[in-house]
């Protein structure tokens, strides 16, 4: 169906085609789009529930507004699959999240309908404000719309954008996609009907004319207008859930039922020409049209391949616990023995593996919502009061709290632990989600310990070490399954800043960190059969480095290879070279394997690691190249 769609969907290549359809055809198209999304995501994985919930909203927006002339900006982009399908990418939708295929999120390079490349939450309103301002400066005339979810609007950046937009009074429409509230059909229909009337041209003109008439009454006109406005606001605050937005300077419309195309289209047509900032509150249901996703939208928010009939995800060939699983289990174990340990996350309880911790220790678990900056400084406050906070956030999202890490935690040398899930290459979610910068952005900060485990057994030891080291510490670990090693019965303390020698050799040394250690060891084992003798070191710590081990090793070899799943600029390899330079160790031929100075595209994890030579084969080739190199230092 992706390449040879039938029915109404076969008529739709662009939003211009949508605008020629009848209401019944649009309703039929919504069903066909849902089928396409379900079928495709069952094969590729992806963000299913949120995209199923916004099908009608997407159709209505493109039907009413003249996109791409009118700018439509999605927040995060979890909900934008229908948008991709109706904006010229229907025939390529089966390539979703595949290498060389469609991105998991809206992306500027992919389509003129993707106004902003997204992937992180809370950005749409600020971007829309800038675009609206640019429209005014350029003396152009087009509509600007931002679609933001009820979760994303809780982000601090979203509030900053709301505050600005309400004050500037520029023409701008924010669509609040609320998929957490539930309304009965009758309430939804009545609400939509009332708002369709109250946003209509006749009512707005009547209201303006009446205000002018009252003002003209000698002596008391202005007082009566003021009194009527006060009465209107008082009554509104009792019945309208948008009083907050009205107080911020927005015209509030809603709540509208988000799966009634007739109501959405009618209201959006009326809203289209309103002046100033407008917020349209739309109620949708996550997972709409696919019962398993409706029943458990959290499970189907981001899901791997699954069976459509049963709704069950495809099982991996081998059941190996993930790093996230082991992190969560270790947190529970450590919390049993230490009542000062608390866990903090930013709207990612399940994602970071803290579900069981939250169940067992609800008084010591804090989900602060999509507010990473608040999470870090909140943790600093807990640490001041002698608690041991563990802040569990995806690597790419912790970037948003960089100043708080420096200023509120490390400057004050507070014992806050950062657990950075999804570090390194993460796969199909692509450049907005790869955790490829954390070693670089963390290792430059004074007082902070930075470590990365080679396997799922070592992560439990590193977590215990981080909690008990008495200073700020970060443990970064990859997405997905571990190496399948046996787990020690108890987590133990690791000597701070000390690596381990995996194997000794005399021809070349490989210094590896995190998930790159095992591929390095495998490459060394294979090359040993050819008589090539290689030292392999699991660095464990990026900061502090095991200076004595590294210096001693490098004094006895002529070739050095560093391997990391991080950008090369300012990363682990850079730290090693800085150390060698400071100790006056010259004459080595050095090669650094890692991510070059570019953003990594989306694709299967295995394929991307191979592409950037971070798998066994790539490391083996790098070793051969280095041993044959006659030119000196090289960056891989």
Image (cartoon, rainbow, N blue to C red):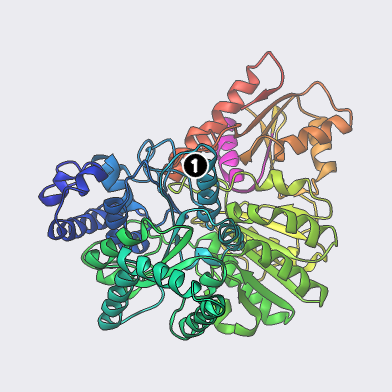
Residue 340, position in %: x, y?
74, 79
Q: In this view, does 487 lie above or below 108?
A: below
Residue 96, position in %: x, y?
34, 45
Q: In this view, does 434 lie above or below 362?
A: above
Q: Residue lying furthest front in this view?
A: 218
Q: Residue lying furthest right in this view?
A: 583
Which SS type dominates the magenta stretch? helix
Q: In this view, does 355 lie above or below 545?
A: below
Q: Which of 358 and 398 is in front in this view?
A: 398
Q: Residue at x 50, y 69 (%)?
A: 350
- Boundaries of the magenta span: 510-528
Residue 277, can we see it?
Answer: yes
Residue 530, can we see it?
Answer: no
Give the quadrant of residue 353.
Answer: bottom right
Give the quadrant of residue 88.
Answer: top left
Q: In this view, does 151 lie above or below 438?
A: below
Residue 356 colored in magenta in the image: no
Residue 512 colored in magenta in the image: yes
Residue 202, position in %: x, y?
30, 66
Total marks placed: 1
Tag 1 residue: 135
Task: Give SS at disc 1.
Answer: helix
Q: In this view, does 9 lie to the left or right of 387?
A: left
Q: Work out which quarter of the rendered image holds the C terminus and state it.
A: top right
Q: Residues within 10 Å of mark 1 (few under 14, many from 20)?
A: some
Residue 609, position in %: x, y?
50, 39
Q: Which of 546 and 211 is in front in this view?
A: 211
Q: Residue lying furthest top in this view?
A: 630
Q: Nearer the viewer, residue 353 or 60?
A: 60
């Amino acid at each position: 169906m992706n390449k040879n769609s039938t029915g109404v969907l076969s008529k739709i290549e662009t939003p211009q085609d949508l605008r020629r359809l009848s209401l019944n055809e649009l309703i039929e198209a919504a069903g066909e789009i849902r089928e396409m999304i379900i079928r495709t995501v069952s094969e590729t994985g992806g963000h299913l529930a949120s995209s199923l919930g916004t099908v009608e909203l997407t159709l209505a927006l493109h039907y009413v507004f003249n996109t791409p002339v009118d700018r439509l900006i999605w927040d995060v982009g979890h909900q934008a699959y229908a948008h991709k399908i109706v904006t010229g990418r229907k025939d390529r939708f089966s390539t979703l999240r595949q290498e060389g295929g469609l991105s998991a999120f809206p992306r500027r390079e992919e389509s003129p309908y993707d106004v902003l490349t997204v992937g992180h939450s809370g950005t749409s309103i600020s971007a829309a404000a800038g675009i609206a301002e640019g429209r005014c400066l350029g003396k152009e005339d087009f509509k600007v719309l931002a679609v933001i979810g009820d979760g994303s609007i809780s982000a601090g950046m979203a509030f900053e954008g709301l505050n600005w937009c309400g004050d500037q009074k520029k023409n701008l429409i924010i669509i609040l996609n609320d998929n957490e509230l539930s309304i009965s059909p009758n309430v939804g229909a009545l609400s939509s009907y009332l708002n369709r009337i109250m946003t209509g041209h006749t009512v707005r003109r009547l209201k303006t004319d009446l205000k002018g008439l009252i003002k003209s009454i000698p002596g008391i006109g202005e007082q009566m207008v003021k009194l009527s406005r006060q009465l209107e606001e008082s009554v509104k605050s009792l019945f309208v859930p948008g009083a907050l937005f009205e107080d911020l300077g927005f015209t509030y419309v809603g709540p509208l039922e988000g799966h009634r195309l007739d109501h959405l289209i009618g209201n959006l047509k009326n809203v289209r020409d309103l002046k100033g900032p407008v917020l349209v509150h739309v109620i949708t249901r996550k997972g709409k049209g696919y019962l398993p996703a409706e029943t458990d939208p959290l499970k189907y928010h981001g899901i791997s391949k699954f069976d459509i009939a049963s709704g069950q995800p495809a099982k991996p060939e081998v059941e190996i616990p993930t790093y996230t699983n082991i992190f969560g289990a270790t947190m529970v174990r450590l919390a049993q023995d230490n009542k000062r340990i608390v866990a903090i996350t930013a709207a990612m309880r399940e994602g970071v593996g803290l579900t069981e911790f939250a169940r067992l220790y609800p008084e010591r678990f804090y989900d602060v919502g999509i507010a990473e900056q608040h999470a870090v400084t909140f943790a600093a406050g807990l640490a001041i009061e002698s608690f041991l906070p563990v802040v569990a956030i995806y690597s790419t999202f912790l970037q948003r709290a960089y100043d708080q890490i420096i200023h509120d935690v490390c400057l004050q040398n507070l014992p806050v632990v950062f657990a950075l899930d999804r570090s390194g290459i993460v796969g199909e979610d692509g450049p907005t989600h790869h955790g490829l910068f954390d070693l670089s952005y963390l290792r430059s900060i004074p007082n902070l310990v930075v470590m990365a485990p080679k396997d799922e057994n070592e992560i439990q030891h590193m977590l215990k070490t981080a909690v008990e080291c008495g200073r700020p510490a970060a443990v970064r670990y990859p997405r997905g399954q571990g190496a399948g090693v046996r787990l020690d019965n108890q987590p133990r303390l690791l000597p701070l800043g000390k690596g381990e020698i995996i194997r000794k050799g005399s021809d070349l040394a490989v210094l590896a960190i995190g998930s790159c250690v095992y591929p390095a060891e495998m490459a060394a084992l294979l090359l040993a059969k050819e008589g090539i003798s290689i030292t392999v070191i699991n660095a464990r710590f990026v900061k502090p480095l095991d200076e004595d081990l590294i210096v001693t090793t490098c004094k006895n070899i002529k070739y050095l290879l560093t391997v990391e799943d991080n950008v090369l600029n300012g990363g682990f390899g850079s730290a090693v070279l800085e150390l060698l330079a400071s100790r006056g160790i010259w004459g080595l031929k050095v090669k650094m394997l890692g991510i070059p100075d570019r953003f990594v595209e989306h694709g299967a994890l295995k394929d991307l690691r191979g592409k950037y030579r971070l798998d066994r084969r790539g490391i083996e080739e790098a070793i051969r190249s280095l041993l044959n190199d006659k030119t000196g230092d090289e960056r891989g």
